[in-house]
Structures are given as structure tokens and as C-alpha cells.
Image (tube, rainbow, N blue to C red):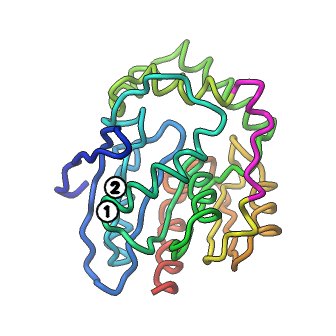
Amino acid sequence: MSANPPQFISVLGRRLEIRLIPGASDAAPPVVMLHEGLGSISLWRDFPDRLAAATGSAVLVYSRHGYGRSDVLDAARSVDYMHHEATAVLPALLAGLSIARPVLVGHSDGASIALIHAGTQRGVRGLVAMAPHVFVEEISVKSIATARTAFESTDLPQKLARHHADGDKTFYGWNDIWLHPDFRAWNIEAFLPAIACPLLAIQGVDDEYGSMAQLEAIAAQTGGPVELLKLAACRHSPQRDQPEATLSAISRFVAALG
């Protein structure tokens, strides 16, 4: 990673960890990256730097409340936690940093948050949804239950502790709500028709947390232009499993928006 150390900003009473990577081109749109359900700034690794270099865009990466070095989660998450992030926290963050008309690049939970945001807020120039969830599938629940077993029987807690201020609270905050019976009805398809900006949806053929039914729902229901990229030999994290193909696709997408 390049020398742009994390900083912190207060958003709606929470201290959030952010990282700003300067852009090389004033003409390139700003990019805002939203991490997965157990992600953080550091877990993006060098992908934000590579994306900034490839596009010329300024890139904002941030750790949501309960993740990374942001304030530690202090209560159980509710079923609508992604809705709150999309409609309250993200707008306040963008306003606080004077970021207008961004391209949102979201992964997993972050992709779902980006979809809700684009379906309820104005000013999104483009949206990249990697391994998005728009409804809950049995494959998701089974894999999240398997992750719980791994957390309680392997060295996964030690690995997460490298990236989060409180790895236990981060893990159970995500895992508990996804396995809660009430979460089975979670669904954000109603937001898709209102998304008018160009959208690139990327998913691995071998994604263990969701099927291609997620991309098919996005393609069928989204209001604006949609491009789908289905990657072979790729599981739930395209930016890690197929970094070159993913970087190339996002770079082309951002360039077309300019």
C-alpha cells in the first residue's frame, strides 16, 4: 500500500476510519469503496491503490462503524442495518468530505449498501456491485453458518484481530444478524427500479455466498443500463480471486463515465 495513512472523521456521532488516495486526473470521477461484511480498509489490501492508479480517480476507502479502526460496535445490528448505512451514514460521510457524484464500488454487504444508496439518493455517477446481495439465499445462510463454526474452531479470530479493533464484536455483529430468523425476509429488490446510473455487477461463478440469481435480479429490475461480468475460477471476492480481470473491468467502466 502507498503512503496514505488512515485518518478519522466523525459521522453521525461515530468515529470512522477513512483513507483518501489522491487522484491523478481532475477529469476522473471520485470513487468511494464500500467493504464486505467482515471487511475494512486494510482488508482491501492494495486494490484501492491499483484502482486509483488505473483510473486517475481520487479514491475514498472507509471502515464502517464496528469495523477496522472505526468505533467498536456497541449494540446488536438490526435487520435494516444496511439501509441505515445507505440512507443516513453514507450521505453524511460524502457531505462531510465534499464528495459529489461519486462512483460507488461495493463488495458483498458494501454492494448492497451501494444499491440501496443509488436507489434512494441522487448524485451517484456509476455503481460497481461485486458479489452483491439483493435477497437472502440458502447458500448464503449455509456459508455464514459455516463461517461461525470456523470462527469458533480455527485461528480466524486471530486473523480478524489484525484488521479490526475488536474482532469478536465485528464477527458476531455480522454473523448474528445474517443468521437471525427475521433476516430471512431481507430483500432490497424494491430499490432497483429507481437506480438510473450505469451499473456494473460482478460475481464469481464459484461464489460460496450467493448464486447468479442475484445478478439476474439486478439485470431484470434495475432502471438504468446494466453490465454483467461473470468470472470463472472466482469465489466471493473478485478483487482477490480475479484481480486483473476485475481491475480491468472497473477501470473501463469508470473511464466510460468520464
What mark, if any, has residue 105 been given in the picture?
A: none
Q: Quadrant where the C terminus lies?
A: bottom left
Dot 2 amino acid type: Asp
Establish if 173 lies above or below 226. above
Determine which residue is flagged by label 2. 46
Q: Alpha-carbon distance for marks 2 and 1?
A: 5 Å
Instruction: Specify the amino acid type for callout 1.
Output: Asp
Residue at the (30%, 44%) spot, across then down: 17
Q: Is residue 120 left or right of residue 61?
A: right
Measured along the vertical axis of the image, is residue 76 above or below residue 111?
A: above
> Which residue is drawn at the image coordinates 31% and 62% (left, top)?
49
Q: Which secondary structure, mark 1?
A: helix
Query: What residue span does the magenta drawing correspond to?
Result: 179-190
Magenta stretch secondary structure, dominant: helix
Location of mark 1 (residue): 49
Identify the residue shown where x is 39% and y is 21%.
158
Q: Are marks 2 and 1 in contact (CB under 8 Å)?
A: yes
Q: Quadrant of residue 183?
A: top right
